[in-house]
């Protein structure tokens, strides 16, 4: 069975008299394993799309500049990742924290932000291999849109656009020394989410 066939199937919403709602999402073990590896909360409606749709496959840690830019450019994942951080850790991120989020692999969002803000901690933590069971992904991906594009080509994921990402194409040829196949490995929960071991811009 693939992860796609085990998507979350139960969303229970109890709407209160004043119009507020309490919602719980029942996920699945495979998705929960990838969410845990990324440092994202499970059983949380705002991350129920992560790693089970056609594009949200990159586990990205967003620095403060990237969060602010995303929110101001029509892709409000800065706020979304901060709320997910609160759901996971019980506090809002401070000015130096990085916040995990599942970004659009098809438009190379994480690599684009890492290129644009090279000093704020934004980086690719891993890229989930779609529908893998048990879940696995590309690790040690240099944090640039070109290396993310190389993984996108390898996993045969379609390219698309995202607001605020002016060049979602990328070029595998500009990431010559990263071998995707050699870095695909099983995903397990990772510790120290705030300080992930990631590769940045050394594409030599």
Image (cartoon, helix red, strand yellow):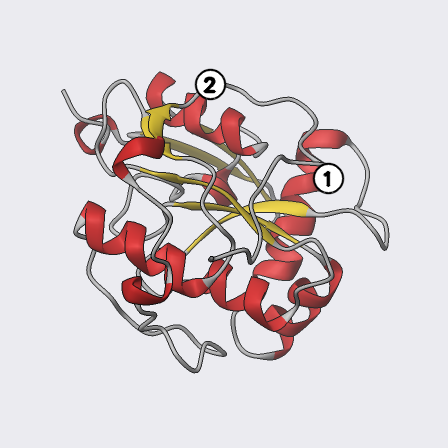
In the image, residue 204 above or below residue 134: below
- Element type at mark 1: helix
The single residue placed furthest to the bottom in the displayed view is 166
Residue 4 — which label? none
When asked about the image quadrant of residue 27, the answer is top left
Q: How crowded is mark 1: few (under 14 residues within 10 Å), some or many (20 or more)?
A: some
Q: Is residue 6 visible?
A: yes
- Look at 37% across and 27% down and name the residue there: 31
Farthest front residue in view: 204
At a point 79% along the width and 46% down the height, the residue shown is 93
Relative vertical location of residue 109 with respect to residue 73 in this rendering, above or below? above
Observer-nearest of 141 and 22: 141
Mark 2–mark 1 distance (CA, rounded to whole Å): 22 Å
Lateral position of residue 162 relative to residue 124, left or right: left
Nearer the observer, 95 or 84: 95
Report the side of 94 relative to 160 (left or right).
Answer: right
Q: Residue at position x 70%, y 56% from top? A: 63
Mark closer to the observer (2, 1): 2
Q: Position of residue 84 (x, y in %)?
A: 63, 42
The residue carrying mark 2 is 188
Q: Where is residue 129 in the image (x, y as percent from the top left)?
A: 28, 37
Q: Is mark 2 on a helix, strand or loop?
A: loop
> Quarter holding the N terminus?
top left
Few, some or many C-alpha atoms within 10 Å of disc 2 (few <14, some 14-19, many ≥20)? some
Q: Quadrant of residue 114?
A: bottom right
Task: Determine which residue is flagged by label 1.
Answer: 86
């Amino acid at each position: 069975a693939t992860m796609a066939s085990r998507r979350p199937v139960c969303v229970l919403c109890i709407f209160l008299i004043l119009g507020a709602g309490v919602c719980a999402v029942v996920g699945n073990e495979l998705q929960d394993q990838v969410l845990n590896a990324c440092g994202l909360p499970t059983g949380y409606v705002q991350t129920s799309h992560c790693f089970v749709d056609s594009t949200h496959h990159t586990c990205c840690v967003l620095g403060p500049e990237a969060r602010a830019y995303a929110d101001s450019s029509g892709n409000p994942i800065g706020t979304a990742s901060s709320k997910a951080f609160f759901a996971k850790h019980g506090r809002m991120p401070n000015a130096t924290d990085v916040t995990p989020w599942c970004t659009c692999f098809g438009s190379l969002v994480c690599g684009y932000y890492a290129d644009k803000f090279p000093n704020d901690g934004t980086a690719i933590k891993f890229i989930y291999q779609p529908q893998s069971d048990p879940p696995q992904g590309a690790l040690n991906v240099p944090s640039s849109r070109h290396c993310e594009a190389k993984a996108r080509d390898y996993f045969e994921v379609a390219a698309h656009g995202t607001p605020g990402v002016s060049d979602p194409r990328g070029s595998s040829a500009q990431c010559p020394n990263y071998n995707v196949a050699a870095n695909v490995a099983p995903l397990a929960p990772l510790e120290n989410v705030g300080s992930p071991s990631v590769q940045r811009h050394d594409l030599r």
